[in-house]
Image (cartoon, helix red, strand yellow):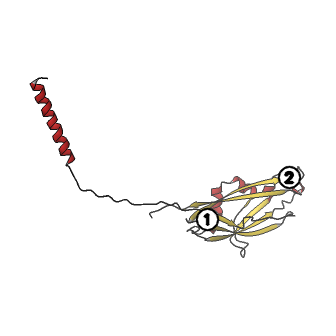
Amino acid sequence: MGVKKRIGMGIMSAALGLTLIGGGTYAYFSDSETTNNTFAAGTLDLSVNPSTIVEVDELQPEDSVIRDFELVNNGSLDIEKVTLDTDYNVIDAEGDNTEDFGEHIQVEFLYNASKLDEVIYEATLAELKDMSPEVVGESIFSEIIDEDGLRADGEADDLVVKFNFVDNGEDQNQFQGDSLELEWTFTAEQGTGGDK
C-alpha cells in the first residue's frame, strides 16, 4: 500500500474515531410523565312496566279495554325521544277472514286515567302498523314526555291506552273466535351530546 493511501486511511480513521467520541459524550436533560385516561360510554335502558300491556278474552264489537303502563329510563343517559313500532299477527279461527282484524281495533292514547276524554292520538292497529315509528312517536310521546325527555336513573312517564273493538254496523261474524297478537316495540333515542 502506498504512502498516500496510508496517510488517507489514517486521516479517515482519526475522523471516524473523533466522531464516535463526540457522539458518545453528547448529553441533554429530559423528563417524562404518563397519564392514565378512561372513556366510558353511558347506557340507554328503556323499560316498559308492565311488559304485557293488555291481555283480554271474549271481546265483542263495542267493547273497550283501558290499560296504563310506564316508560322508565333505567339507563345513565337521558332519553330525548321515544318511537313506537307496531306489529301484529291475526290468528283466524275459521279461516274465513276477508278483512284485517287490526282494522277493527282502534287505539286511543290518553293523557291519564282520570281524563279519559282527552285523547292525544287515535288510530287503528292497522294504521299504526303502516306508519313509521318516528311519526307515531312524535304524534304520541311528544305530548306525554316533557321537553327535557326522560331523565336518567329511573325517571318514568305514565301512559294510558284505550283499545276499542269498533262496531262498524255491518256483519263482523268473520272475527268470531279470532285472536290478535300485538307487539309494540318502544325505542329510546339519546339527546344531543355536549361538552363534558
Residue 154's x, y, as percent? 61, 71
Quarter of the image for residue 126 reads: bottom right
- Mark found first going from the N terminus, 2 or 1: 2
Q: Residue 194, relative to residue 100: is it above or below?
A: below
Q: Residue 168, relative to residue 11: is it above or below?
A: below
Residue at the farthest bottom position: 114
User: Disc 2 to disc 1, how far (Cα)?
Assistant: 36 Å
Residue at the farthest left position: 3
Residue at horizontal 17 percent and vertical 39 percent from the top: 17
Residue at the farthest front position: 1
Q: Quadrant of the C terminus?
A: bottom left
Q: Quadrant of the N terminus?
A: top left
Q: Circle 1 — which element? A: helix
Residue 93's x, y, as percent? 88, 53
Mark 2 residue type: Asp
- Mark 2 or 1: in front is 2
Label 2: which residue? 92
Q: Circle 2 — which element? A: loop
Label 1: which residue? 142
Pointers 2 and 1 in contact (C-beta within 8 Å): no
Residue 11's x, y, as percent? 12, 33
Residue 59's x, y, as percent? 85, 63
Mark 1 residue type: Ser
